[in-house]
Amino acid sequence: MEFAGTQLIEAEDPMLVFSDPEVGAAFETIDAYESESCGLGGGEDEGPDQDASVTELDPNATRIDVAATDFAFDGDIPTESDRYSFVMQNDGEAVHLIILAKLAAGATMDEVMASEGEEGLEASYESDIAAPGAEAIVTADLT
């Protein structure tokens, strides 16, 4: 796994580590364990794949620029219904992504977090991972 870590640092691409066969084999073992012991992984319980257009800039959507630092976001977050493309610039030292979540009626964020998204979540959309200095996009219709 040292080789994958070296590739990751040199390429500054956090996803490159998954192309290493050793890492892939390790994740297969982890996924199998999670599926058997925790009810996680295995694909079936994860729901349908997200539409690829969610991670693309929509020229017809309102663009919202967001600056991400380590574990904080700054931007003019909209409060009106519309189609938005959030363009996150990662100014931090850690990798980041944006997740947009629509809570079910009556649900609280604390309840959703406590259930790890299993309860109280009507919909969610997430960006790709952005390495430090990179950007990621998430586009969705907000109501």
Image (cartoon, helix red, strand yellow):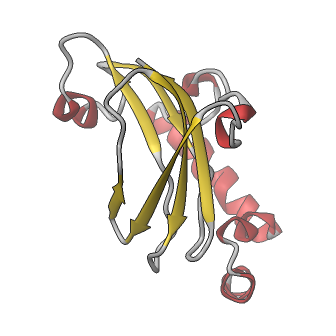
Residue 118 in view: no
Query: Which image quadrant is residue 105 in?
Result: top left
Q: Locate residue 60 relative to residue 90 in the image: left or right.
A: right
Q: Quadrant of the C terminus?
A: top left
Residue 102, position as x, y percentages in the image: 37, 23
Residue at position x 56%, y 28% in the image: 46
Which residue is at the far top?
105
Residue 100, position as x, y percentages in the image: 43, 36
Residue at position x 60%, y 70% in the image: 131
Q: Which residue occupies the foreground of this view, 137 or 104?
A: 137
Q: Which residue occupies the foreground of this view, 52 or 28?
A: 52
Look at the picture and state if 49 lies above or below 26. above
Residue 8, position as x, y percentages in the image: 69, 80
Q: Which residue occupies the foreground of this view, 118 or 143?
A: 143
Residue 1, position as x, y percentages in the image: 68, 80
Residue 68 in view: yes
Residue at position x 61%, y 48% in the image: 137
Residue at position x 71%, y 37% in the image: 59
Q: Locate residue 89 relative to residue 43 in the image: left or right.
A: left
Look at the picture and state if 14 lies above or below 46. below
